Amino acid sequence: MTAVETQRPQLSSSYLPRSPVLGGSDPEAKRAEMAEYFTSVFDRYESLFDLLANDAAFYDKPIALRHPLIFYFGHTATFYTNKLVLAKLLRERIDPRLESICAVGVDEMSWDDLDDTHYEWPSVGEVRAYRQKVRAAVLKVINSLPLQLPIQWEGTWWPIIMCIEHELIHLETSTVLIRQHKLDYVQSLPEWPPCKSSGTVLSAAPENQLLSLPAGQVSLGKARNADRYGWDNEYGHRQVDVGAFQASRFLVSNAEFLQFVEAGGYADDDVWDEEGLKWRNFAVARHPAFWVWRDAWYLRLMTEEVSMPWDWPVEVNCLEASAFCRWKARETGEPIRLPSEDEWYRLYDHAGVHEVSAAPASANLQLDHYASPCPVTEFAQGDFYDVVGNVWQWTHTPIYPFDGFQVHPLYDDFTTPTFDNQHNLIKGGSWASCGNETRRSARYAFRRHFFQHAGFRYVSSDAQTKEPNAYYESDRQMSEYAEFHYGDSYFNVANFPKAMAELAIAAMGDQPAETALDLGCASGRATFELARHFAHVTGIDFSARFVGQGAEMAEQGILRYTLTDEGELVSYKSSSLADLQLAEYASKVAFYQGDACNLKPQFSGYDLVLAVNLIDRLYNPASFLETVHERLKLGGKLVLASPYTWLEEHTPRAQWVGGFKKDGENYTTLDGLQDLLGKHFRQVGEPQKVEFVIRETRHKFQHSYSEASVWERIL
């Protein structure tokens, strides 16, 4: 095996390698391919910072919301060290101080979320020297690490590709920051050539038109054994039918967007939503950020300003793109809007786009052509242009996880911070997108006020698109209950809500099973389990938040939540009705908020009432027990279960139905139940102890028993 050269070579005009295939039959050939991929990306990233004209450019922030460029110059190298140490592929750190200060970037939470932290940044020379040490260390790992194909998610080679793809992401985002820098701080270099073809007169831009796409089915996501690297949010599956719609043939050009600017679109409150208005007013935005007015319009590129190329795609944030679409809809009477992620995939498939493979790409991607956008008429893909490449395309879809989403243990915060319904997906890639970013399966998302090399195309459709909820429940109690109901079993203890539903179903015997009431249903698992046997099941809980979890399960078929592992560390979980073999019963359940001590009259006539871990949480349990017969048919069954944890914070002492001395003797809750229910019920069989476990953290659990009793209404 020949070691790969460790010193940075003079950059050639060769194209950047594509993201490698993970399989193959020759491990040593794959090793050499990985070494080339690493060095090509590492060196190209370093060459980007040669565009900075002086050392001051490394320390003066291009925008107040992000770190200075010295951070990003060092960040990708420290990422290699930090992840490979974590993966135990490097035995020791190279520079602990630098690896700490350049470890975590800034994802601005809002446009006014300024980072005023002061750092003792390293010198440019320190970072350059550090990068060369990292280059040599990573190559040593690549040249010596045992390699078994295919490279897999849980394997030792996965973090190496992860680090390379991470550097490619920052290659692109750093070009945006350089583009936002002062012109005095940048210089042009032949390795980073902008497109020289442009139409500087308005008539050079094509007139956009809507083209029709027929309805069709699209498949999103990929399997764990896919042949190329993917980030965590790409794995899983979603298949959806997309209705017919129309899409603009071209990306919106600078010329087309000028109509919006000259029509006063930036001052027209009616075309901006609430978030857009707040951003527009804060930023005092009057035109796209990269447009410059000096007696005529110019466009800022990375290292220069050029006469406005009217036939290039406009580059705006999602809020501006959405405002344009509302304006366009009003002007044309057409239902114009941004496409959904599903619709972009339908466009991709319909246009016959292929993955980027041979160089040069048949799209403005992978740095194969330019270090800038180019005319929207240059790259045709089917009847459309720039379905991929040139600039990213905003969608109106906030990023969400596919079913079965899992984080990679070495990078658990790559995607999860974006599951907040505030980060919208961008699709298609830009001229600076390389590697994984160019793949059909790529899913990247940014805050809607964020500037990237991103523009948009619009669609015309009356369809009201609805994507899965991205929300992850993070409230600790709610997450614990979600896990208690729908998650894993611990210490070989069966799922408690399911066990209680099965006990109740068994108690019914051959009796009619039309309707059941799950009272105090919490997150709703028993409600769904009862629907295996009953024609319709109602779940009621006093807590609207618990009812919301059950309703979300019924509507979405999936519930997502975070679990506390230790301290501030969490893991991300999702549970689905499909995995629990409950999906077919979702149409048989309904959830309502209600007070068990004061239920509305319509909640009556049930064959079964199940009340689990409820009575010792009621403010007046006797009132509930004395009237619960009104909810049941004659002969119907009441199943009660409780650990009898009487606490005054839930139930005033005077309202306890047991657990105290009465007439000098022990008076248990079962005694109280027999006294209060005896007029209308007969007890069926003996009480049973049913155990349950609630997970609090990875290392702390509650282990309890609930006493279950069955009662038949006789009067």
Image: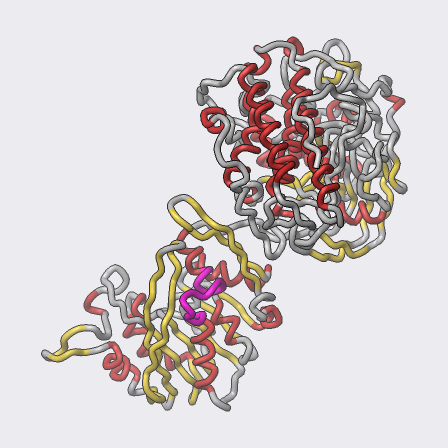
What residue is shown at x 45% (from left), y 72% (from top)?
Answer: 518
* Image coordinates for residue 485, horizontal then vertical, percent: 46, 65
Left or right: 316 in relation to 114: right
Residue 300, magenta (yes or no): no
Q: Nearer the viewer, residue 332 or 358?
A: 358
Outermost residue to the left: 664
* Image coordinates for residue 638, horizontal then vertical, percent: 39, 81
* Image coordinates for residue 448, horizontal then vertical, percent: 62, 35
What residue is shown at x 32% (from left), y 68% (from top)?
Answer: 704
Where 392 sits versus 355, above or below? Answer: above
On the image, which quarter does residue 404 sit in?
Answer: bottom right
What residue is shown at x 59% (from left), y 50% (from top)?
Answer: 154
State which region is magenta: 482-496
* Image coordinates for residue 157, horizontal then vertical, percent: 62, 43
Where 232 sits versus 708, above or below? Answer: above
Left or right: 39 in relation to 348: left
Q: How many marks?
A: 0
What residue is shown at x 76% (from left), y 30% (from top)?
Answer: 16
Q: Which quarter shows the N terminus?
A: top right
Residue 282 visible here: no
Q: Magenta stretch mostly in which secondary structure?
A: loop
Left or right: 607 in relation to 304: left
Residue 515 visible here: yes
Where 257 sits versus 23, above or below? Answer: above
Where 432 sits versus 1, above or below? Answer: above
Residue 491, magenta (yes or no): yes
Q: Which quarter shows the C terminus?
A: bottom left
Left or right: 568 in relation to 162: left
Scheme by which the image is coloured: secondary structure
